[in-house]
């Protein structure tokens, strides 16, 4: 499905000012068609107001508003990007231990003719599909499936591309009984040592270890309205302020926006989205992602194994480094 419309049918709270304008525009167009009355001047006026309102909204988005866009129900998911960017995707199933987790999909594919291993977190559109995909929250068998495929990529010298989109790993009893924390920890260790190039892209939500479990890569990119965080804003608000209503304040404090993550060196590149969000034009978002993948994959492929591993090691060693300064005598 490719979305490309003037005003989205599903509007977030901060987009509500667009609704009345869109309804007025539709009413004027209906009058023009049915009664043959010339209302072109009024239509142009409303269209100008819509464009002005869009600029006022989307050019000054808060961090919390970007989180809402990252969770937009019409936002392109991993399978949407796979259909638009890759060729000959052959999905591989199961972790060979417990089962096949549908929250993580993976398999071989071609990117402009180059063979790669693709691993992605997938949410559902309908209630039925969300239940099947567990709302994009992987169980431990999902991470073990991902590791199996990454080891396969290592064996056949295939670059690894990961698409991250999860609120977090599933925290249910069964998931804990099957050792989800251990599964993620093993992935972190193994991904740090693979000799093949790897790229991770946060396309929507990048929640905690659930995201990191497939994202320890040579290059980490993020869409401009996606987020990547150690905890959800609601979870942070519940811990610090004992009330999820403070989620907008928590989102600011967590510095989880793409711009802040780039500034801190957590991500390496921010991918541009269509104006108003990726859900408004799937093709433009996919084209931007494809260009970034090809460019960075070419750069990584030029490195020998020793340099690749050293750069990856240094990339993660420097994260979280800070200095303390004494104010005494200042």
Image (cartoon, rainbow, N blue to C red):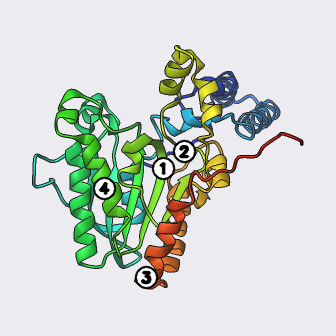
Q: Which residue is mark 1?
A: 203
Q: Position of residue 252 (x, y in %)?
A: 65, 32
Q: Position of residue 242 (x, y in %)?
A: 52, 14
Q: What crowding class fits label 3: few (fewer than 14 Cα within 10 Å), some (14-19), or many (20 or more)?
A: few
Q: Tell me the quadrant of the picture where the C terminus can be found.
A: top right
Would residue 8 be found to the left or right of residue 297 on screen? right
Point 33% across, 45% down: residue: 122
Who comes first in sequence, dot 4 or dot 1?
4
Residue wearing tag 3: 306
Classed neighbour count for the residue bearing mark 4: other residues with Cα under 10 Å, few (<14), some (14–19), many (≥20): many
At 47% across and 68% down in the image, what residue appears? Answer: 313
- Check disc 4 and report the residue beneath it: 187
The residue to which callout 2 is attached is 226
Which element is circle 1 on?
A: strand
State the residue lying farthest toward the front. 329
In terms of sequence position, does the residue under pointer 2 or pointer 1 come before the other? Answer: 1
In the rendered structure, are the residues bearing label 4 and label 1 in contact, judged by CB atoms less than 8 Å apart?
no
Q: Nearer the viewer, mark 2 or mark 4?
A: 4
Residue at mark 4 to residue at mark 1: CA–CA distance: 20 Å
Measured in 3D between alpha carbons, the distance from the residue under mark 2 to the one under mark 4, in whole angstroms, is: 23 Å
| Tag 2 near tag 1, CB within 8 Å | yes
């Amino acid at each position: 499905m490719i979305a490309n419309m003037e005003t989205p049918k599903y509007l977030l709270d901060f987009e509500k000012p667009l609704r009345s304008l869109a309804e007025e525009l539709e009413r004027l167009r209906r009058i023009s068609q049915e009664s043959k009355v010339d209302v072109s001047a009024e239509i142009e006026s409303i269209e100008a107001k819509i464009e002005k309102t869009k600029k006022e909204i989307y050019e000054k988005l808060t961090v919390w508003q970007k989180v809402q866009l990252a969770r937009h129900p019409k936002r392109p998911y991993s399978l949407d990007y796979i259909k638009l960017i890759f060729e000959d995707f052959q999905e591989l199933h199961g972790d060979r231990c417990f089962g096949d987790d549908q929250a993580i999909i993976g398999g071989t594919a071609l990117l402009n003719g180059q063979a790669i291993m693709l691993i992605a977190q997938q949410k559902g559109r309908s209630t039925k599909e969300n239940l099947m995909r567990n709302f994009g929250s992987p169980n431990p068998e999902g991470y073990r499936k991902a590791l199996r495929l990454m080891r396969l990529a290592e064996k056949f010298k295939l670059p690894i591309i990961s698409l991250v989109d999860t609120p977090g790993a599933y925290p249910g009893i069964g998931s804990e009984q099957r050792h989800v924390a251990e599964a993620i920890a093993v992935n972190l260790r193994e991904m740090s040592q693979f000799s093949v190039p790897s790229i991770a892209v946060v396309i929507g939500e990048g929640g905690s270890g659930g995201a990191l479990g497939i994202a320890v890569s040579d290059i980490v990119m993020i869409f401009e309205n996606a987020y990547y965080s150690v905890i959800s804003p609601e979870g942070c608000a519940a811990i610090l302020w004992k009330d999820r209503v403070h989620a907008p304040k928590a989102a600011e404090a967590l510095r989880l926006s793409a711009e802040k993550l780039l500034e801190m060196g957590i991500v390496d590149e921010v991918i541009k989205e269509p104006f108003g969000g990726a859900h408004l034009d799937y093709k433009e978002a996919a084209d931007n992602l494809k260009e970034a993948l090809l460019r960075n994959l070419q750069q990584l492929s030029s490195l020998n194994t020793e340099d690749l591993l050293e750069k990856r090691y240094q990339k993660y060693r420097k994260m979280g480094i800070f200095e303390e300064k004494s104010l005494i005598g200042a």
